[in-house]
Image (cartoon, rainbow, N blue to C red):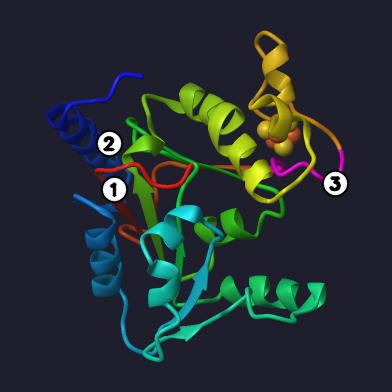
Amino acid sequence: MNVDTESVVYSRLEKTANALRANNMEVFIVENRQKAMEKTEELLSEGDRIGLGGSVTLNECKITDLVRSKKYRFIDRYEAGLTAEQIRERHIEALSADVYITSSNAVTENGELYNVDGNGNRIAAIAYGPGKVIVVAGYNKITPDLKEAIMRVKRIAAPANVKRLKIDGYCSKTGECISCKTENSEMSDGCSGQGRICCDYLISGYQREKNRIKVILVAEKLGY
Ligand code: SF4
């Protein structure tokens, strides 16, 4: 596997950052996960009600630990013992949070965020509701365009997440979406059944509300 040189990494990050800024998102480029956590902390205010999208990236950056600080009011959907109905209520509460923090399944060099959900709670919060959305994404999430972003989810992100969630699905065994067997498959083609984690698709392009979405691009591999 080719590893990009530091200058290639930063030049792609800059290109992506400029395109996201042109789409009215605020962007920060940081060198590693520690700096990503510090930048996230800078963007938060004491007393903020915070919702979180499920994310390996946020765990790796210790942002999941950060939001548990007593300084903030974390809408904790991971609290032990919650019933399915209580988790649903926390998801709905997160839609009116002061801040929603998440990663992105892909970030294109054309300035788009691309996300796919099983339940839709995360993409709903990215699109509308929380006053501020902080997106933390590693260099590995950057794709040249939407076409590659769609394939990134089908070939990397979704199969890895299905495995992580211990779902007995097609892509957990083969490492890619069932739709990859078909030439020219469409974005929403895939498997069927309760184990499917790709159901709702969101492309965040130009934003009318300037800087509501704040993207922290990290110059290292994070999540998948
Ligand atoms: S649609 Fe199904 S097979 Fe395709 S990536 Fe998603 S979970 Fe895997």
Residue at 77 percent across and 30 percent down: it is 170
Q: Earlier in the sequence, mark 1 or mark 3?
A: 3
Give the residue at mark 2: 16
Nearer mark to the viewer, of 2 and 3: 3
Query: Where, by quadrant of the figure, is residue 159 drawn?
Result: top right
- State ligand 1's quadrant: top right
Judge left or right: residue 27 versus residue 153. left
Q: Earlier in the sequence, mark 2 or mark 3?
A: 2
Label 1: state its secondary structure: strand
Q: Which mark is residue 207?
A: none
Amino acid identity at mark 1: Leu
Residue at 22 percent across and 60 percent down: it is 35
Give neighbour class at mark 1: few <14, some 14-19, many 20+ (Cα, 10 Å).
many
Residue at the extreme top: 183
Q: Characterize the magenta stretch by its predominant secondary structure.
A: loop
Instruction: Please report the bounds of the magenta region as a residue range.
Output: 193-200
Label 3: state its secondary structure: loop
Give the residue at mark 1: 217
Give the residue at mark 3: 194
Classify 105 as above or below 183: below
Amino acid identity at mark 3: Gln
Q: Nearer the viewer, residue 34 or 190?
A: 34
Q: Earlier in the sequence, mark 1 or mark 2?
A: 2
Query: Where, by quadrant of the figure, is residue 38 drawn?
Result: bottom left
Give neighbour class at mark 3: few <14, some 14-19, many 20+ (Cα, 10 Å).
few
